[in-house]
Image: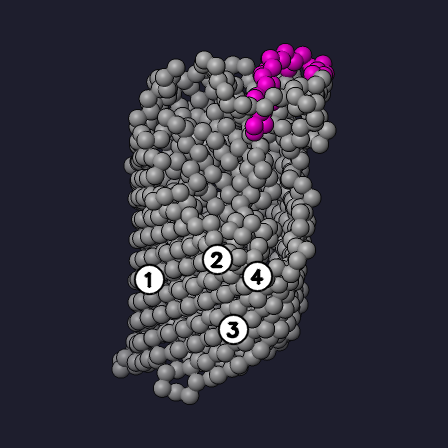
Amino acid sequence: MVKFQLKYGFILILFFLSLTSMQSQSSGAISGRVLSAEKEALEAVAVVLLGVKDSTYVDYTITDANGDFNISEVPKGNYILNISSLGYLSVYKDLSYTGEAIALGDLILREDTYELEGVTLTAVVPVQIKQDTIAFNANSFKVDSDDNLEELLNKIPGMEIDSDGKVNAQGNEVTKIMIDGKEFFGGDPSIVLKNLSADAIANVEIIDQKSDESELTGVADGNKEVVINFTLKESRKNNGFGKISAGGGLDNRYFGNLNYNKFTSKTQFSVIGKINNINITGSNIQDFLKNADGVDGDGDDEEEQNSAQRTKSLSGYLNTAVAGVNVGHEFKEKESLNGDYFYNYSKNDGSSLSKRITFSNANNFDYEAENEYINTKNNHNLNLDYKNKSNPNNSLIVKGQLISDEVNSYSNRKGRYFKEEGLSTKNDNLSTVDRDRKRGNMALNFYQKLRKKGRSLATGLKTTFNRSTMKNDQYTLITRQVNTQNESVKELNTLRDQKLNTSAINFNFKYTEPLGGNHYLKLESYMGNKIDRENVYQNKTTITSSNKEEILQYDYDHNENNYQTRLAHSYNVGTINTYAAMELQDIVRSFGVVNEASMTTDRLFVNPIATVQYIPKRGRKYRLSYKRNVRTPRPTESSTVVNDLNPFSIRKGNPDLVAEKIDALTVSAIVHDFRSSLSFNTRLQYQYTKDAIIKSVDVDEDYVRTLSYQNNGIKRRLNTSLGFSQKLKGLGLRYSIRNRNFFNTNNAIINFQLNEVTSRDFLVSATLENNNKSMVDLKAGATYSVNNTSFSIEHDLDRKYTKQQYFSMLDCDLGEKVNFNTQFDYFIYTDNAFASNENIPLWNATVSYAFTKQKNHVLKLLFIDLLDKNIDIYRRSTTNYFEETTSESLGRYFIVSYMHKLNNRPRKG
């Protein structure tokens, strides 16, 4: 098997290299030096190589402090060399590159006086570098007619979108995405990138945006965030645009998409609509995925799981309907209001098979469960965002959100417990859950600049609420000591009505006083109050001749007040930012059943904080930070009542728990060399937890698992990540390597015996792709991940499972009107605990035809999962059991679709 895996991965790489070798490469460099008219060297000037045919991007670099540049990985051919810098007239040179080095010598940039004589026609500048912004011209990159912004970002150098949907720009995580400087659907990347057309964009700006406080006061604090701003083409402004598409295929598969936008200088309006039954969400449904395979309560959603395996994939069959509208208006310069509404309907149904091995000292057993499920969700999401930065001395930012969820779940689960002698107990459970949840939050932040430079104050207020009602109707049939003389049967009907109300209010205040010499004194104060209320009525009926009833009814309150006062010193000069503080934190908690004596705790903590950040030049950032955090017990962990909704999984709180103290040390480095296009980023975080809140698990002879909590010992957690990307000299290729490691060790008490659980995760991925994507986009790579989980009381049950993925992708234009795209993935799952090793090949392909040169009408044929492997695998390891779930998923289907662009009139010459 190992030989086959290595051979297969090697064949993929050879296939990729053979395709890319169609272009003859050479290591001869194109070099030169850029000077001003006064013969002074110009630094950070963009030097871009463009294709002659369509001026698409081929490669770029920037000049160093001496004005020198060098482009070395270039295919043979004819090019346009563009040299541009803000405030200077661009220079264009035609080049014929044969593989031999080209030394251009001194190139002069002259200042742009903006005095035009007659009409001057100039080509578009592909890359512009400003003080805190790098702007890429979208026309310099090959995009297909129906590509969205996600496809455009994937072709820009230094941009990456990982499997979780997070966007990284030159090693920095992107925190916000905007359209023409304004938020779009709350800045949610998953909505913006998947719905707006790439051909509507003029420029992609990567901005190192200052914090709101630093922007107001003019004093750098080192707290920058990376923002992507998409600027629209002039032809798309004051003119509605968008696209509509629909498709249908075999087995009644269908989809339909609508996107319409209209932007003016003051107003922003967008509409999104989607409907499909091909397992495409088009929005974020992580809440839905948490319970994707059945009844809640059979597991523990707070189980310590490794970071690499925490995200659960979507299985089964999914129907989705999405509708959204976004409206924004700018009242005057730097004062705007933006609002959006988003509706999401999801229906997910299917079946799954779970296998679990549970141990509790000598009382070990296996568990299998077959489950059929139907989950539906209606979600409404409203966002409001008001910003007023028109006054140079103060700014006001107000954000608000309202969310409404209605979830209906049905599950029919057949569970079987096995010991060495065979089947022992059956647990058949039929459950319906109806949940209605309303959530909301509002945040207000005000910043005031005072007369003395650097003196300022800031205040903030945030309120949140969460109202949830849940009705759970369960029928359980338990058969113990199966096929023996002592076989017994127990039937239970359980009705549970539960109401959860959570409200919180937090206030913060910060005053900054300059001490001179770039030193600042900061006084910061935080006050918070959180109230959790739970109202439960539970009727559990044991079906016998007399139908015995057990009534559980209670009202439970948990109140927490948090007071923090922090005295800090900061030093901000040029390339160095430091911050050191000492914080006093007082936490007062009171909790218990209403009308009974409550528990009250009051504890004082001293928390040191320190941060050092060094930014020697553009593209380099080094950061070291240390902070002590305090985590108080959650209401469920300290609850004084027992949750026995699931008769095989009972939860008990511990009111005597105290808060955890977590010391966290984080080191990070980001390097992006614009000249060589090398990107490197790494991050290391170590957490050491005292008074750790650990689980205490007791499993009896009837397989009833009772979970409680204790303060016992310490936890250790280490996370490391590394990313590296660079061009392969002379080959016209770029490779990327990603590595993530996770180490976690914590204690658990299993049947009164201390058990140390250690989890080690390792993930590495490598990708190889071509640099020049003007006609062909090629990519190949592999990902290997492994989890090792060990237990101190059961060495024989140490677990190791792996997942391998090999993939190759080809996207090419077959003439001006035809595009072909295909991707092949091969997954290999192995597990030493279960004899369920799987090899899953997935092959998708699309062919599209544009009827017009402007590609306003496109016909597309989609072939999905051509090999018809409708399977999905999910695994997890916990304190005293590990399991594997295999689910059915949507298999092979074919769809014919048609796409029409709205108001896509060709530009006039």
Q: Position of residue 274 (x, y in %)?
A: 32, 40
Q: Nearer the viewer, mark 1 or mark 3?
A: 3
- Dot 2: what SS? strand
Report how far apart the C-alphas of labels 3 and 4 lie in the structure.
Answer: 20 Å
Asked if the magenta segment contains residue 446, the reply would be: no
Residue 80 higher or lower than 182, as above or below: above
Query: What residue is at 52 percent from the left and 54 percent from the top?
Result: 213
Residue 184 higher or lower than 854, as above or below: below
Residue picked out by circle 4: 512
Q: Nearer the viewer, mark 3 or mark 4?
A: 4
Nearer-N-terminus badge (3/4): 4
Q: Are marks 1 and 4 in contact (CB under 8 Å)?
A: no
Left or right: residue 62 compared with residue 849: right
Residue picked out by circle 1: 437
Q: Position of residue 419 (x, y in %)?
A: 53, 67
Rendered image: mark on residue 448 = 2
Q: Is residue 444 visible?
A: yes
Dominant SS of magenta comes to: strand
Q: Which residues are magenta?
A: 76-104
Q: Quadrant location of the C terminus?
A: top left
Given the current orientation, which residue lies at the most extreme front position?
Answer: 451
Residue picked out by circle 3: 563
Query: What residue is at 38 percent from the left and 69 percent from the top?
Result: 502
Asked if the magenta segment contains residue 83, the reply would be: yes
Applied colour scheme: one colour
Nearer-N-terminus badge (3/2): 2
Left or right: residue 351 compared with residue 722: left
